[in-house]
Image (cartoon, coloured by chain):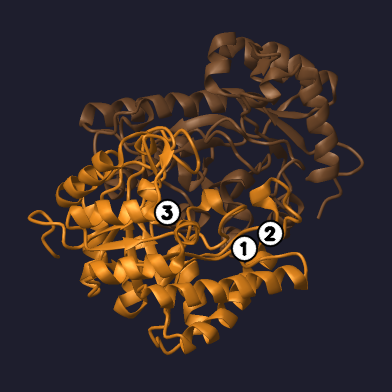
Chain colours: A orange, B brown
Amino acid sequence: MRDFSQDHRWLSVNTATVRKSGGEDLPLPRIVEACVERGIRAISPWRDQVQAAGITKVAKLVRDHGLKLSGYCRGGMFPATDAQGLKAAREDNRRAVDEAAQLGAACLVLVVGGLPGALQGQPAHKDIALARNQVRDGIGELLEYARTANLPLAIEPLHPMYAADRACINTLEQALDVCDELDPYRSGSLGVAVDVYHVWWDPKLEQQIRRAGRSRLLAFHVCDWLTPTTDLLNDRGMMGDGVIDIPRIRGWVEAQGFAGFSEVEIFSTGNWWQRPHAEVLDTCIARHRTAV
Amino acid sequence: MRDFSQDHRWLSVNTATVRKSGGEDLPLPRIVEACVERGIRAISPWRDQVQAAGITKVAKLVRDHGLKLSGYCRGGMFPATDAQGLKAAREDNRRAVDEAAQLGAACLVLVVGGLPGALQGQPAHKDIALARNQVRDGIGELLEYARTANLPLAIEPLHPMYAADRACINTLEQALDVCDELDPYRSGSLGVAVDVYHVWWDPKLEQQIRRAGRSRLLAFHVCDWLTPTTDLLNDRGMMGDGVIDIPRIRGWVEAQGFAGFSEVEIFSTGNWWQRPHAEVLDTCIARHRTAV
């Protein structure tokens, strides 16, 4: 297992973590600048942030600074109630692949979606098996396209508390079942993003990380699970402030040969998004060394 | 599958559902009275409610009204940081078995506990594997005692969002692994409580219900998953108001020969606990017929 205690060369910052600074929106170019100042070598930006800044400008910034992109957030949201909705998702996901390729991202992270309309509080139906079939079909189709762009797709199993509205792939085992079905020969074009927040509770986690192996482990995300957790979406903790044994999980992942970045992804309405981004980034660096 | 649309003879009310009426505590004897008035044939009371009313009085009330107890809530909370803590849990669980037997409950529901101290916001460690071992050992020990009282133990897998603080058994598969280890010959003394709120998201749910079979299916609990869910603990929905396909899950359970009560268990700080209990119980009866 790599020693992270001496430096932060394997730290990546998911830009959602500093999406706000002191409660105010922080534009992506300023996030990039603040990361570069601190010797952070990689980021993982969100599409809306890239769009707001302009992708050409972001691509140039990334290139000029020699930044790596540990991932691009995000594709997915496949399920829909009709052919038009499925088509819209397909087209949007192809654009996401193009953007990720243009930015030189290591992978496109897929948050696959749940019941159509649920995120807007109006679920169109209760058939999660149907949603899961649409997800599998959608990934299969996107995979063809992503291969032509040489852009790996990383399925991110989301915590079961998001099954209805954000992602109906909820365990690593389930994600790997999809990988095995769609990419049986482990081409490297399809794998998983392991985010400790979503999977730490899983009694089969070690076993399934082993099953994934190096070829399927495309990204490793960290933050922490707070007790109590006061909000289902935006109450993630800084590494070390919660109950997740992050080094143990990283050990399992690295035992498979994973040697990529450890990407910090924190959504935190009540705490970190209220603080100055400089403090947040400095804390990420410190905790990367001590708690990851 | 049984037809629930014509009557509510298979409805049981978990008394937490009407623990408050109009925001005020409602004592168990009044809950019993309100259930009996409505022809509700079964309840599942909580220990604190029984204790507040006095167990002798509750036992007499239950007997006089010919009420069934679909379960008794709850034993568990096995993990601890030292021998004294483990002993305290053991003794408390034996008392819970005695109470359940005295009340004639069909089973003692086990909410097994998570990381010691986490429920109080001060987790003593991050070793969920250790907690899980303590849970298995604790259930094994309690099982010996419960057998002498002829009182089945029902392990309730809790939603993964409770893994840290309430229960580190989080899937039906995991619960059944424990059952198979501790009671390999399916004696009937150890099984599971399937609460749709906790397990609806699980892609392996149907498969694991089949694995459980009639001998392990000791209780079936219903409520609904709301979108959005605004509180991790106390924002459960009334059947029909959320995204869970309850009849489908009940169909899987009944296909195994389960023919017991369907127990409504709703914790709802913001909604149902604020309403008069008469309205809540009448709604439970109506939804039992239309949405379960």
Q: How many marks?
A: 3
Give residue B256's mark.
2
- Residue B71 spot, x, y in % from top left: 61, 33
Q: Amino acid at mark 3?
A: His
Asked if labels 1 and 3 touch by Cβ distance under 8 angstroms, the answer is no
Say whether residue A10 is visible.
yes
Look at 50% across and 61% down and name the residue there: A51
Label 1 environment density (alpha carbons within 10 Å; few <14, some 14–19, many ≥20): some
The quarter of the picture where the N terminus of chain B appears is bottom right
User: Can you tell which of label 3 and label 1 is closer to the viewer?
Assistant: 3
- Residue B142 spot, x, y in % from top left: 40, 37
Q: Secondary structure at mark 1?
A: helix
Asked if labels 2 and 1 touch by Cβ distance under 8 angstroms, the answer is yes
Left or right placement of residue A89 versus residue B109 in this view: right
Give residue B68's mark.
none
Give residue B210's mark.
1
User: Can you tell which of label 2 and label 3 is closer to the viewer?
Assistant: 3
Q: Amino acid at mark 1?
A: Arg
